[in-house]
Image (cartoon, rainbow, N blue to C red):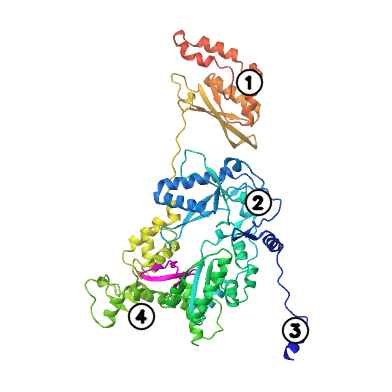
Amino acid sequence: MVAEYFETESFGVRAAPIMESEADVRAREILKSTTCRVEGRYQTGLLWKRSDIQLPDSYSMALKRLAGVEAKMRRDTDFAVEYNRIISSYVMKDYARKLSPEEAALTCNRTWYLPHFAVKNPNKPGKLRMVFDAAAEVDGVSLNSQLMKGPQEYRSLPAILFHFREGATGVCGDIKEMFHQVLVQRDDRCAQRFLWRQGDTTRQPEVYEMRVMTFGAACSLCAANYVKTLEYCNKVKSATRAVKSILDYHYADDYVDSFDTEEEAADITKQVRAIHKMAGFDLCNFASNSLRVTEALNGDGNIRQIANKEGVLVDRVLGLFWQASTDTFGFKLRTTAWVLRFIDVCRRRKPPDRGYGLTAKEVETAKLCLCRLVQRGEYAEEFQHIESGRNLPRTSSLIKLSPYIDEDGVLRVRGRIEAASWLPISARRPIILPPKHCFSNLVAMHYHVKMHHQNLEATICEIRRLYWIPRLRSLLRSIVANCAICRLRKIHAVSPLMGPLPIDRLTPYVRPFSYTGLDYFGPITVTVRRANEKRWVALFTCLTVRAVHLELAHDLSTDSCIIVLRNFINRRGVPVRVRSDNGKNFVGADMEAKCFSEVFDWQFWTLMMVNRVDSRRRECCEPLISCKNIGNP
């Protein structure tokens, strides 16, 4: 009766169903029509925006990018060995296939060559991940620009994280090479070609094609998620909780769940792994705050890689550091401030109806909390001596700093500028931070960016207003050495080689202006009677001895240019060659001189020059009287 009452009350006001965009509808149709089981795994198609896609030729672009990878391989032998190993493993695992010359010659409108490169994960030293750059463009077109992302049907990251620690036992794992477990249908594989030649630049590269979804394509995540949550999960009647784990407690390839008991955690996770196995996925690398659950799940020897963060073994869970042994998380500064506010609200220290933004005091409290945690972990022995009133041991790295613990439980320097009362306490007694801790590195990086990548001394001065980090210069030098912006600023452009000088600049034993350059500058304003008019100046430059001759030009017309040239010849003699740019007046004068010889009266100038030259010096002047025209050679 109550249900009927509320059903009547809500008549006409029920929430409308979620409307999908046309792109998501098309993507879902492609997934439904192309997804099928092949070779024990699922195969699907790429999510093309249109059926009439026509991609430009990308072979040259991929070849240039391959040359860049090969140059790095020549510089770094370890990188070359690992890169070769990755591609060899792709071929061995049947993720990629080498095409024969006949197959490589066959192309279609969707043929695309993917450039590839490798990225390093700082949390996994020595391990490379190969990425196909589907965003690389040719004529403004990339593979990703022609693909749809598809519907995003997974829960939000905060919702998954909140659930992760609801139960007493937390479990996390990841799907091994999830994208590469989903096959791409044959008609679409031509869009996933790439070039490779094992670093041997003396031969033409061979053509390969990826048979599976790639890390870098826009639709890979949607396709893999669709296969992972396919309708076969609904057919598993005896694993309702396991299906819920797959549908609600996965984020991409990460599995993050929590349970009330250790037995339930181990049992449900094994069911989840079995269901994934049906789709060709391998769920492995488990971690838990329960040692029994970890041993039960990793009995096959697949132990999760655990990061060593400042001497403490931690796992990475969706971007957070999780110390499973103590069941605690590590956060960034502002995240810590939000967590502290949440704790205060739960403990009723503060009212819950506060504004959204953080206050300056909350940020400062979070900063002191992080500093205190870092110091307690790094200087535990020093804390014990100071709290018990004993002197620091001579082996302590802080013995010269006269440290003390303030009212907030933070270790500070007792300096020599106590009399500078106008300075804040943070400058007179800065907080001590260990030089090799990641938190100190983050602080130094923050100030390096805040100071706009200035010199070390300016950054050191700014940091020491709040913190005292021993060997700070060494720390900043390492940060500058790894800073991309600073490295780019220090690069000196290589000056190009100067081209050889033309014969006009090198001919000896000729009089000035035998080889001449001509150009105009202006306009300049002159006074003619009572009016102001524009005039230009013709600049004649001797190309041999760099002498200068100026002539006044009435305007920029061809006739004016001819008059200027005649005046110049009257004063300096007939040049062998005159060089100029392609100004219309210069081109016009050149054409007039070629068509009409009387423009410059060459015969008169030749006869006059011959009569004026002494017979003993006539050889030197022969190039001058052999001039036939004026213009570019």
| Mark positioned earlier in the residue sequence (4 or 3) | 3
Name above or below for residue 280 compared with residue 96. Answer: below
What amino acid does circle 3 point to? Answer: Ser
For label 4, the SS is loop
Q: Secondary structure at mark 1?
A: helix
- Earlier residue among tags 1 and 3: 3
Q: Nearer the viewer, mark 4 or mark 3?
A: 3
> What's the CA distance linking mark 1 and mark 3?
96 Å
Q: CA distance from mark 3 to mark 2?
A: 50 Å
Q: Nearer the viewer, residue 439 or 491?
A: 439
Up/down of 95 relative to 417, above or below: above
Q: Amino acid at mark 2?
A: Asp
Give the numbered dot on residue 593: 1
In this view of the protein, which residue sits in the foreground, 517 or 549? 517
* Mark 3 or mark 2: whose residue is earlier in sequence: 3
* Discs 1/4, front: 4
Residue 572 colored in magenta in the image: no
Which range is magenta?
298-323
Side of 404 relative to 368 (left or right) = left
Q: How far is disc 4 from disc 3 in space, using C-alphas?
A: 57 Å
Q: Kindly identify the amino acid type of the residue bearing the numbered disc 1.
A: Ala
Where residue 590 appears, x then y in whole percent?
Answer: 62, 24
Sequence-first disc among 2 and 4? 2
Q: Which residue is mark 2?
A: 187
- Find disc 4 in the rendering and name its residue: 409
